[in-house]
Image (cartoon, grey):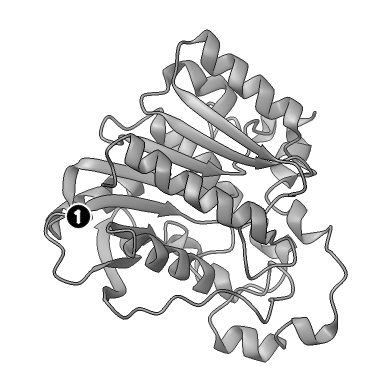
């Protein structure tokens, strides 16, 4: 398994698609109007839409090095001291899928916050070609990423979030972020990584000093890893390698590998979506956060 192939896992779900008819997808103009990215490929017409009723949800921002970082948040209306759950996005930016996931987590009783930590590179969701997108997101240093997440936590605390109940969930590149932040932050109580890459390319070493596999012995919070057996970039053998590294270091983590699922199986707006795996993984995520007292 090469590091180059591991990085390709961020987009592997775009290249292996189940056969679907043209009517199953939105037109490009409809997808843009609905707030989805186009770089991820065709957008499913049946993408999940979560009603914001009962939620205080919308955009805000927090000051970070380099400007004002946009945030999308969702929390139950009139919730007193809700737990804080960070939502770490895919490489495609803060588009409608990530916002909808944030609302879903808000419905679990949390103050869910999705920071747009790629904002310094412009509106990634407006980029239509993956070849134009990847150099931008790959230029994000881990040190800057962690500082942006720390600022997001401080913002959430200032909004009344419970500083003693902080979790993080991430998808695709955001899954890698979960592993990294759970080894870096002293405040996170638990993390859930949806198909996050585990090995980094050697070319990224200056910006990303340690891969999740390398940083496994430093893990500070328990992490649940959710992966697909058909993932073309993160095969089960690599997941087993990560599991062994964590066990050797005495770290708490659990994994579930879905037999029929590939990369991006939770992304309901993409052809890679696997309904059964996605729904089970969501319940696994909720149970994990309850187990570690992030959710009640």
Query: Looking at this rendering, what residue extends furthest in the right direction?
Result: 19
Residue 143 appears in view? no
Image position of 28 with respect to 77: above or below: below
The image quadrant of residue 38 is bottom right
Q: Name the residue that disc number 1 marks.
A: 82
Image side of residue 258 versus residue 117, left or right: right
Image position of 293 with respect to 214: above or below: below
Q: How many marks?
A: 1
Image coordinates for residue 28, horizontal then vertical, percent? 70, 86
Q: Which quadrant does the N terminus fall into?
A: top right
Q: Which residue: 30% across, 74% down?
A: 57
Residue 58 appears in view? yes
The image quadrant of residue 292 is top left
Q: Which residue: 79% across, 44% down?
A: 230
Q: Which residue: 32% across, 63% down?
A: 106
Q: Which residue: 74% across, 82% down?
A: 25
Image side of residue 278 versus residue 63, left or right: right
156 vs 128, nearest the viewer = 156
Image side of residue 138 versus residue 261, left or right: left
Image coordinates for residue 210, horizontal then vertical, percent? 53, 26
The image quadrant of residue 11 is bottom right
Q: Secondary structure at mark 1?
A: loop
Image coordinates for residue 67, horizontal then vertical, percent? 31, 62
144 vs 150, nearest the viewer = 150
- Check disc 1: other Cα within 10 Å, few if <14, some if 14-19, many if 20+: many
Image coordinates for residue 236, horizontal then vertical, percent? 74, 31
């Amino acid at each position: 398994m090469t590091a180059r192939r591991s990085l390709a896992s961020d987009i592997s779900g775009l290249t292996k698609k189940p056969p679907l008819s043209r009517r199953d997808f939105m037109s490009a103009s409809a997808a843009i109007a609905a707030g989805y990215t186009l770089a991820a490929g065709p957008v499913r017409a049946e993408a999940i839409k979560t009603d914001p009723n009962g939620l205080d949800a919308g955009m805000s921002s927090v000051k970070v090095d380099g400007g004002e970082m946009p945030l999308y948040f969702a929390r139950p209306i009139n919730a007193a001291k809700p737990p804080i759950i960070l939502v770490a996005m895919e490489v495609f930016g803060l588009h409608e899928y990530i916002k909808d996931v944030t609302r879903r987590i808000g419905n679990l009783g949390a103050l869910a916050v999705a920071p747009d930590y790629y904002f310094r590179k412009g509106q990634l969701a407006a980029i239509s070609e993956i070849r134009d997108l990847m150099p931008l997101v790959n230029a994000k240093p881990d040190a800057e990423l962690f500082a942006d997440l720390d600022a997001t936590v401080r913002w959430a605390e200032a909004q009344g979030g419970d500083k003693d109940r902080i979790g993080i969930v991430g998808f695709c590149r955001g899954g890698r972020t979960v592993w990294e932040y759970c080894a870096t932050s002293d405040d996170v109580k638990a993390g859930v990584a949806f198909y996050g890459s585990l090995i980094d390319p050697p070319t990224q070493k200056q910006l990303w000093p340690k891969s999740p596999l390398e940083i496994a012995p430093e893990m500070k919070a328990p992490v649940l890893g959710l992966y697909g057996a058909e993932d073309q970039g993160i095969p089960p053998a690599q997941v087993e390698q990560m599991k062994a590294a964590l066990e050797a270091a005495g770290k708490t983590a659990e994994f579930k590998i879905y037999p029929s699922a590939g990369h991006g199986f939770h992304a309901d707006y993409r052809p890679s979506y696997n309904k059964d795996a996605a729904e089970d993984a969501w319940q696994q995520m909720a149970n994990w956060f309850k187990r570690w007292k992030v959710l009640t």
